[in-house]
Image (spheres, rainbow, N blue to C red):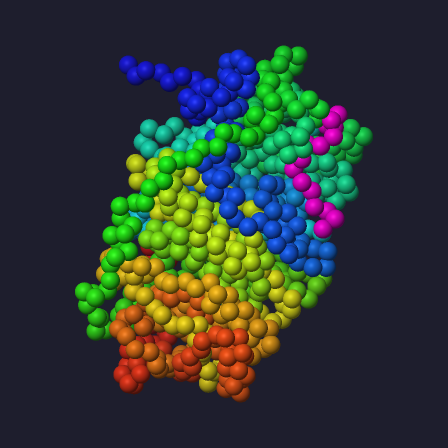
């Protein structure tokens, strides 16, 4: 008979943490108190392994109104308006119940946005799955996409962008990172603080059930056959809509002191965190909480993660008004506690005190400093060179294979299930480098993207982290938008494994360096650790969600070739590498070698140059060179514009490297012949390298070498067929 674990261990505490709890309280905690510490000191809630690293990020900038520490970050976009945005993960729940896991991830991050006083205006997502030849992976993908669509479409918020990557490291542990963006006036920003002793604490929305209990502890563990998953939360987008309208009405009229959604750890996290930010105490009576099931204990109520619930702090004089507003929207409301001045977090069940803990003790978990060690594979895989790699004869076939790779192919099967036109603000739809939305009542627009390359981060975490930031910014620059700030989703394996924590540390160092040099602050984010299955970790996967501003909405461009006879010009130094790329993985079954070089000074110059050319109307197409190299980038421009192109490459080197080698800090642009001299003059003045490659026109993509030898000759229809059908054909 297996020895039963002590209660504190079942609650997710380690021996040192439990000892610390006893020191704080001056006594042993009771069952509920142990549970409260367990959930709030879990990695998912406390970031105890990651807090020291996250301090490396720059969090201030000329546009930042609110950085990390609140429900979401806020940036100024002029005219007294601000964008509010954040990324959240829902990885483990999506692995167990893909539909509800993804759906509640969308609903949860939307609540983080409107709790800041902002109306959600757009959603994006970053998804990772195993290989599509596995029926279980297809089940996960179908369920996750349906969940995102099912919740987002009913919520009435357009899903305007995203990315998907397939790799065997995610076979059993998919990643579902949801991003939401909202719009708010500066004077309507609300924060999650329980200020003002004597103020009322009230709950609004769904009744509290037993779903999701210990969900944050579950999210802080590795997945295994022995993992006991909680009852996954169920979402109700129609109720969330009503909650949004009711809460926004109260906030717009100045009736709300503080507000927070009940996400991870439910009542416990929302109430304790609000009190902690304000330096106050709080008293909750669980008997006053509307309950969905009979016989619920204080433990059940405090740790439930039932969806569509909000915790609000209001002045007593506004109780009647709040009740009237919630009644108008048919949303249940109940006063369940009050703010206190003693700094104590107190839970009652009627007259009985069932938990009593200093607030700061709950909200400030002990920091852990895991050991880190460079993985054995790192130097070995970096040392690989392509010297022994055979040079292909038929590059047409290779281009077709790359276009058919699920990591490059069209994601239409996915995003066509999303409503991206609701609200009628979407100007550039999913599938472009970045989504573009108009801000009604103004002449400006915003651009949004989410990106990350986990293969790069596996082979070189520091460089991969920097590239994640640079590439997201490049996506915005390609539509003409100036990057404002970013939100991150940091997905890694078990941080107690030295090699994993080393990856995490290196990625953060790389991202931080890129953020500083590119002057793009981090204003919010999420850390998801212990993404492992059967002891095998996912590849290190930082994703970067980024927002940019377009002062003139009419001056955006896309990656589509626009007219025959346009000149195609490459901005940036063309130094392609065969290591670490999609070509090496797809054609040769290898993942090794050095990742592409990244010079952040060059990156800044190229992006600034691209934005200037777009702003001045000198170019009408822009697209970054990313996975699959130059040939894939040009093919994507051809497919998007349904127009061919003829290029001659003036470069020397292996033809597979020239065509399919990946490179950073390079952007393809196209312009009318009359604009060429002006484009080249601007490029020269800004100190950016450039190469005239060819012209648009015809129905095929033809790429020649410097000696007029044909490297690629592929009809657009052939390319488009394999590109569009790759993912859809699996279903």
Can you tell which quarter of the image residue 485 is in? bottom right
Q: Is residue 266 magenta?
A: no
Q: Residue drawn at (71%, 32%), measured in percent from left and top?
A: 195
Q: Is residue 31 visible?
A: yes
Can you tell which quarter of the image residue 588 is in? bottom left
Residue 699: image location, x then y, percent: 38, 80
Viewer-side residue, 208 vs 31: 31
| Marker count (numbered) | 0
Which residues lie in the magenta part?
A: 186-200
Viewer-side residue, 78 vs 470: 470
Viewer-side residue, 208 vs 686: 686
Magenta region, mostly helix, strand or loop?
A: loop
Residue 33: image location, x then y, percent: 53, 19
Q: Residue drawn at (37%, 75%), measured in percent from left and top?
A: 716
Q: Residue drawn at (44%, 77%), measured in percent from left and top?
A: 690
Q: Residue drawn at (57%, 73%), measured in percent from left and top?
A: 612
**Left or right of 703 on screen, residue 231:** right
**Left or right of 436 on screen, residue 392:** left
């Amino acid at each position: 008979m297996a020895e039963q674990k002590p209660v504190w261990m079942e609650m997710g505490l380690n021996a040192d943490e439990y000892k610390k709890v006893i020191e704080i309280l001056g006594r042993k905690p009771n069952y509920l108190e142990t549970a409260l510490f367990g959930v709030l000191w879990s990695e998912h809630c406390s970031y105890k392994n990651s807090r020291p690293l996250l301090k490396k990020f720059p969090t201030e900038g000329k546009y930042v109104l609110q950085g990390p520490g609140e429900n979401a970050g806020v940036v100024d976009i002029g005219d007294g308006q601000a964008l509010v945005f954040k990324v959240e993960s829902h990885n483990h729940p999506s692995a167990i119940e893909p539909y509800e896991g993804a759906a509640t991830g969308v609903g949860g991050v939307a609540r983080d946005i409107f709790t800041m006083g902002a109306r959600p205006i757009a959603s994006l997502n970053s998804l990772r799955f195993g290989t599509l030849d596995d029926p279980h992976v297809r089940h996960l993908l179908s369920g996750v996409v349906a969940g995102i669509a099912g919740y987002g479409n009913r919520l009435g918020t357009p899903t305007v962008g995203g990315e998907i990557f397939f790799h065997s490291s995610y076979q059993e542990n998919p990643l579902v990172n949801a991003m939401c963006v909202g719009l708010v006036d500066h004077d309507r920003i609300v924060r999650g603080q329980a200020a003002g002793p004597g103020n009322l604490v009230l709950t609004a929305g769904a009744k509290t059930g037993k779903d999701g209990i210990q969900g944050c502890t579950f999210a802080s563990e590795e997945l295994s056959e022995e993992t006991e998953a909680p009852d996954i939360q169920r979402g109700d987008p129609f109720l969330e809509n009503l909650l949004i309208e009711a809460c926004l009405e109260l906030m717009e009229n100045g009736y709300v002191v503080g507000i927070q959604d009940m996400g991870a750890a439910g009542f416990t996290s929302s109430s304790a965190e609000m009190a902690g930010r304000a330096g106050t105490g709080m008293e909750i009576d669980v008997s006053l909480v509307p309950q969905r099931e009979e016989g619920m204990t204080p433990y059940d109520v405090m740790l439930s993660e039932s969806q569509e619930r909000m915790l609000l702090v209001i002045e007593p004089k506004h109780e009647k008004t709040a009740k009237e507003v919630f009644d108008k929207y048919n949303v249940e409301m109940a006063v369940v506690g009050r703010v206190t001045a003693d700094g104590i977090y107190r839970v009652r069940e009627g007259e009985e005190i069932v938990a009593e803990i200093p607030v700061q003790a709950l909200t400030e978990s002990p920091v852990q400093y895991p050991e880190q060690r460079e993985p054995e594979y790192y130097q070995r895989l970096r040392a690989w060179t392509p010297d022994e790699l055979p040079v292909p004869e038929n590059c047409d076939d290779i281009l077709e294979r790359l276009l058919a790779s699920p990591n490059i192919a069209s994601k239409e099967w996915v995003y066509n299930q999303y409503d991206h036109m609701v609200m009628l603000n979407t100007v550039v739809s999913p599938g472009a480098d970045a989504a573009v939305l108009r801000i009604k009542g103004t002449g400006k627009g915003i651009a949004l993207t989410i990106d990350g390359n986990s293969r790069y981060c596996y082979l070189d975490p520091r460089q991969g982290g920097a590239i994640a930031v640079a590439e997201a910014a490049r996506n915005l620059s390609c539509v003409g938008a100036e990057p404002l700030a970013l939100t991150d989703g940091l997905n890694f394996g078990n941080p107690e494994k030295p090699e994993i924590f080393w990856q995490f540390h290196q990625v953060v160092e790389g991202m931080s360096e890129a953020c500083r040099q590119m002057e793009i602050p981090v204003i919010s984010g999420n850390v998801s650790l212990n993404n492992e299955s059967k002891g095998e970790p996912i590849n290190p996967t930082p994703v970067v969600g980024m927002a940019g501003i377009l002062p003139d909405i009419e001056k955006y461009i896309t990656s589509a070739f626009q007219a025959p006879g346009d000149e195609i010009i490459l901005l940036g130094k063309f130094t392609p590498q065969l290591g670490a790329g999609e070509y090496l993985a797809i054609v040769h079954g290898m993942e090794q070698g050095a990742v592409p070089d990244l010079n952040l000074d060059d990156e800044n110059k190229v992006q600034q140059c691209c934005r200037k050319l777009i702003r001045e109307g000198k170019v009408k197409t822009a697209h970054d060179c990313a996975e699959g190299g130059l040939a894939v980038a040009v093919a994507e421009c051809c497919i998007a514009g349904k127009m061919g192109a003829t290029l001659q490459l003036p470069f020397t080197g292996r033809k597979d490297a020239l065509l399919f080698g990946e490179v950073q800090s390079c952007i393809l642009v196209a312009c009318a012949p009359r604009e060429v001299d002006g484009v080249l003059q601007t490029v020269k003045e800004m100190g950016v390298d450039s190469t005239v490659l060819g012209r648009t026109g015809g129905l095929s993509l033809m790429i020649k070498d410097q000696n007029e030898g044909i490297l690629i000759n592929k009809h657009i229809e052939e390319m488009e067929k394999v590109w569009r059908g790759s993912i859809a054909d699996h279903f």
